[in-house]
């Protein structure tokens, strides 16, 4: 089965009643048949049928044998550090979620780990930065919020030669668009709060691997530390997975259209979106992923103008996080990445004028109209309003890799329109 079909086929074949929707086992403990031996489930911190089904599906979607669900994306990233020993080094990409930068900058050294940051977009620089003590290479691609692209195949080859684990944060692309294990990564980490959940109503994380030894080590620590995802959140996440394919298809197409609009706007200095022709990582991204994702970032050259634009939006809610059905806007420097430690701010904190848009499933014409109004209210000159034309969108099927294909009538005199 193709990935979109797998997202929907979530029924548990072992359910004695044949429930179409996965049952919620909202219980702390399980009755045992014997006082001397445990059954398959005994205590939800260790294992729970709802969470087990979720983990099986997450592993399946990523093309792996094992997955572990955690209480948050940060708990999942923190779990990776549990694979290391004092004295080991982490080499991380230099465009990371602010919480990850805080963890690596403040908490990792308290555990006796050293941390270096490098340009994940430059395999040569990563290879040069690896030390004898480097045991973990952690990257995002596309990155958040600058949407930079790392070449997973090249990084996997470098990590393999060096004997280093490669972990990829796949929160933005999700396994529908990108499967890092197929490119040689050892571990995939998710903030499942975002695209996988998709409705901004849960907080969760996941680590996926094809290595049984790594899985067993992580599972032991998770049970001992008590960071497993609760049953209700696991059930919500299973429900979110069912709509991942149509949600992401619509979001990718709408995000592309918004990125094109912003790229042509005179008040916008630069647009960050991996599907634009001038994006430096476009060829690499298209080789390893099947769609651009729902994020669009842009700069104006003026932090105050960027603030006014965000605060003038009506359909884009001012909020952190991304990937949900509702569109949101933020200033990463002041919001999601404000937690970057000051000593790392010069390298890791995004530009103060950067605006990040997470495009939801609203009608794209409404979102474009909202952006036009916000730019005008913020004082940004807009010469494009009169040039826009009404366009009707209809969702169509996804291709076998889960890429977005949304049918929209194109004017006959626009054969060069970017699709």
Image: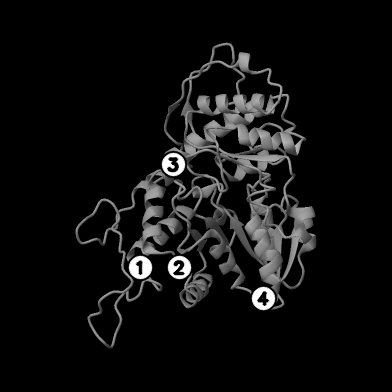
The residue depicted at 63 percent of the width and 43 percent of the height is 285
Residue corresponding to mark 2: 228
Q: Which is more toward the observer, 2 or 344?
A: 344
Residue 168: quarter of image: bottom right
Q: Position of residue 385 (x, y in %)?
A: 62, 17
Q: Is residue 119 visible?
A: no
Residue 373: quarter of image: top right
Cα distance between the residues tagged 1 and 3? 26 Å
Q: Which is more toward the observer, 298 or 56?
A: 298
Taking the image as shown, residue 128 lies to the left or right of residue 76, namely right
First reached walking from the N terminus: tag 1 or tag 3: 1
Q: Quadrant of the C terminus?
A: top right
Q: Which is more toward the observer, 5 or 408?
A: 408
Q: Position of residue 89 (x, y in %)?
A: 71, 70
Kindly indicate whether the residue at mark 3 contacts the one at mark 1 (C-beta within 8 angstroms): no
Q: Tell me the number on the disc at residue 111.
A: 4
Taking the image as shown, residue 194 lies to the left or right of residue 305, namely left
Q: Which is more toward the observer, 5 or 338?
A: 338
Residue furthest to the bottom: 36
First reached walking from the N terminus: tag 2 or tag 1: 1
Cα distance between the residues tagged 2 and 3? 26 Å
Cα distance between the residues tagged 4 and 1? 30 Å
First reached walking from the N terminus: tag 3 or tag 4: 4
Element marked by disc 4: loop
Of marks 3 and 4, the one in the foreground: 4
The residue depicted at 31 percent of the width and 68 percent of the height is 27
Residue corresponding to mark 1: 48
Element marked by disc 2: loop
Vertical relation: 239 (above or below) 112: above
Q: Tell me the number on the disc at residue 245.
A: 3
- Near mark 1 (Cα within 10 A), the count class, few <14, some 14-19 or many ≥20, is many
């Amino acid at each position: 089965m193709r990935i979109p079909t797998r997202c929907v086929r979530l029924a548990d074949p072992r359910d004695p009643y044949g429930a179409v929707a996965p049952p919620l086992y909202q219980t702390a403990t399980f009755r045992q048949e014997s006082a001397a031996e445990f059954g398959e489930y005994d205590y939800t911190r260790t294992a729970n049928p709802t969470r087990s089904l979720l983990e099986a599906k997450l592993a399946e979607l990523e093309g792996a044998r094992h997955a572990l669900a955690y209480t948050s994306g940060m708990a999942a990233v923190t779990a990776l550090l549990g694979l290391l020993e004092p004295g080991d080094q982490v080499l991380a990409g230099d465009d990371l979620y602010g919480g990850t930068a805080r963890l690596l900058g403040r908490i990792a050294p308290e555990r006796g780990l050293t941390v270096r940051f490098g340009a994940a977009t430059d395999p040569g620089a990563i290879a040069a930065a690896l030390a004898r003590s480097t045991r973990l290479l952690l990257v995002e691609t596309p990155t958040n919020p600058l949407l930079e692209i790392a070449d997973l195949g090249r990084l996997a080859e470098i990590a393999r030669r060096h004997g280093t684990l490669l972990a990829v944060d796949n929160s933005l692309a999700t396994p529908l668009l990108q499967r890092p294990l197929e490119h040689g990564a050892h571990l995939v980490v998710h903030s499942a709060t975002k695209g996988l959940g998709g409705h901004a109503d849960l907080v969760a994380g996941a680590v996926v691997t094809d290595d049984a030894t790594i899985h067993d080590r992580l599972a032991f620590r998770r049970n001992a530390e008590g960071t497993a995802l609760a049953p209700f959140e696991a059930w919500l996440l299973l429900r979110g997975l069912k709509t991942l394919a149509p949600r992401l298809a619509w979001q990718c197409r709408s995000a592309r259209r918004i990125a094109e609009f912003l790229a042509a706007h005179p008040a916008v200095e630069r647009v960050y979106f991996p599907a634009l022709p001038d994006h430096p990582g476009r060829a690499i991204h298209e080789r390893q992923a099947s769609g651009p994702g729902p994020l669009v970032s842009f700069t104006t050259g003026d932090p105050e103008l960027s603030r006014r634009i965000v605060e003038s939006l009506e359909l884009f809610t001012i909020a952190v996080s991304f990937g949900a059905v509702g569109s949101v806007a933020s200033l990463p420097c002041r919001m999601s990445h404000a937690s970057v430690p000051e000593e790392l701010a010069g390298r890791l904190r995004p530009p103060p004028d950067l605006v990040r848009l997470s495009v939801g499933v609203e009608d794209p014409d409404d979102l474009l109209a909202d952006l036009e109004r916000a730019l005008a209210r913020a004082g940004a000159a807009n010469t494009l309003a009169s040039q826009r034309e009404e366009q009707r969108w209809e969702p169509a099927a996804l291709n076998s890799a889960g890429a977005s294909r949304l049918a929209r009538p194109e004017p006959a005199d626009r054969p060069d329109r970017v699709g």
